[in-house]
Image (cartoon, helix red, strand yellow):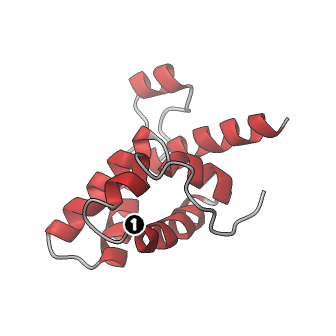
Amino acid sequence: MSNSTLPTRNEAWGFYGAAAGFTDADAAWSIALPAIAKAVRASAEGVRDFLDSRHGRHFADDVHNGIHAGLALKAAIDAAIARWMGWTISRATAQEHGIPQGLPYLTGFVGLYEIMAEAEQV
């Protein structure tokens, strides 16, 4: 797996689709994917699949909130990353998704999608 910036596979929904409603989706994608990969030490494939998911759409909503509060795009993405890294996986979320309890939220969900991406290649 590489750590280059991969294109979305879900332009209509997920992070990309949501970002298109409030900013330049290509610019947001090109900032978010490598920033998340670096923050959680994940592959580009895992981050792409996270961003393309419903969880990626929720992440975009958080970025949108930052922009609405007056942050520039990169600062809003960085703030969303920090917020998602500050939350932890609860017991209920761990049981529902199989993510270890206590992990940072962003790490847990990106890791889940990274595992699923690896499984597709087997």
> Farthest residue in the left direction?
69
In this figure, which residue is indicated by the disc labeled 1?
Answer: 25
Residue 12 image point, x, y percent? 41, 48
Q: Which residue shows up at 47% across the image and 73% down it? A: 31
Query: In the figure, 32 relative to 88: above or below?
Result: below
Residue toward you, 13 or 73: 13
**Whether residue 97 can be seen here:** yes
Q: Residue furthest right?
A: 122
Q: Quadrant of residue 118?
A: top right
The quarter of the rendered structure image containing the N terminus is: bottom right
Quarter of the figure with residue 116: top right
Left or right, 102 with reference to 63: right
**Among all residues in the image, which is located at the extreme front?**
12
Q: Of helix, strand and loop, which one carries label 1?
A: helix
Tag count in the figure? 1
Residue 95 location (% of width, % of height): 49, 20
Please indicate whether residue 1 sits to the left or right of residue 105 in the image: right
- Amino acid identity at mark 1: Ala
> At 53% from the left edge and 64% from the top edge, which residue is drawn?
33
Residue drawn where x is 14% and y is 69% of the image: 69
Quadrant, the C terminus: top right
Image x and y of residue 117, in percent: 69, 41
Residue at 51% from the left image edge and 26% from the top image edge: 97
Q: Nearer the viewer, residue 28 or 11?
A: 11
Between 18 and 41, the residue placed more toward the observer is 18
Q: Position of residue 24 (x, y in %)?
A: 35, 72
Tell me the quarter of the picture where residue 38 sits: bottom right
In the rendered image, is residue 83 in sight? no
**Disc 1 packing (10 Å; few <14; some 14–19; many ≥20):** some
